[in-house]
Amino acid sequence: MRHSLLPLFLFLSVFACRKAPDTIPLPTKICVQTSHHYYPIPNATVYVKFNADSFPGYQQPPSYYDATFRTGADARGCIEAVPEGTHWLVAFGYDSIHYPHNVFGSIKLEVSLKDRPVRDTMLFVSEQH
């Protein structure tokens, strides 16, 4: 009888020592491609304001936003583990293809675990008029 309990004891001791995760990462993601006149704008900085119903504007300091990421050489960038809700993305970049100038733009996106856990879209930017 003593030997038959040993495997059960080992099994329980292994699982009893495992810690539960503090947080479970969300399976959500937002990906954008920054574009000006349908030309990619690489290396743009994208600021994210989570759970915001109104447009945050272009004048906010970087510390106002909840997250930031950059687009790569292909003008694509992503942020993962995004909370559910309505979020604003505000992008700033530089267009060196047309006449050189700074460009910026924004987009409002809804993320939902049930309906839209992954968003992949174009974020159009333009020069200041």
Image (cartoon, rainbow, N blue to C red):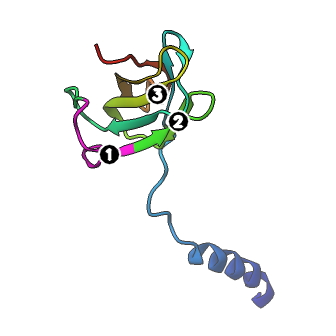
Q: Tag 1's secondary structure? A: loop
* Residue at the image position 53 percent from the left and 71 percent from the top: 19
For this orientation, the residue located farthest to the bottom is: 2
Q: Earlier in the sequence, mark 1 or mark 3?
A: 1
Quickly name the residue at label 2. 78
Mark found first going from the N terminus, 1 or 2? 1
Q: Is residue 88 left or right of residue 75?
A: left
The range drawn in magenta is 58-67
Three-letter amino acid code at the position of disc 2: Cys
Crowding around mark 2 (Cα neighbors within 10 Å: few <14, some 14 to 19, many 20+) is: some
- Name the secondary structure under disc 2: strand
In this image, 18 relative to 11: left or right?
left
Residue 78 in the image, given as x and y percentages of width and height: 52, 36
Considering depth in this image, is 129 or 59 the residue closer to the camera? 129
The x, y position of residue 49, in whole percent, is 30, 37
Task: Name the foreground residue: 79 vs 43.
Answer: 43
Q: Which residue is mark 3?
A: 94
Residue 66 - label: 1
Q: Nearer the viewer, mark 1 or mark 3?
A: 3
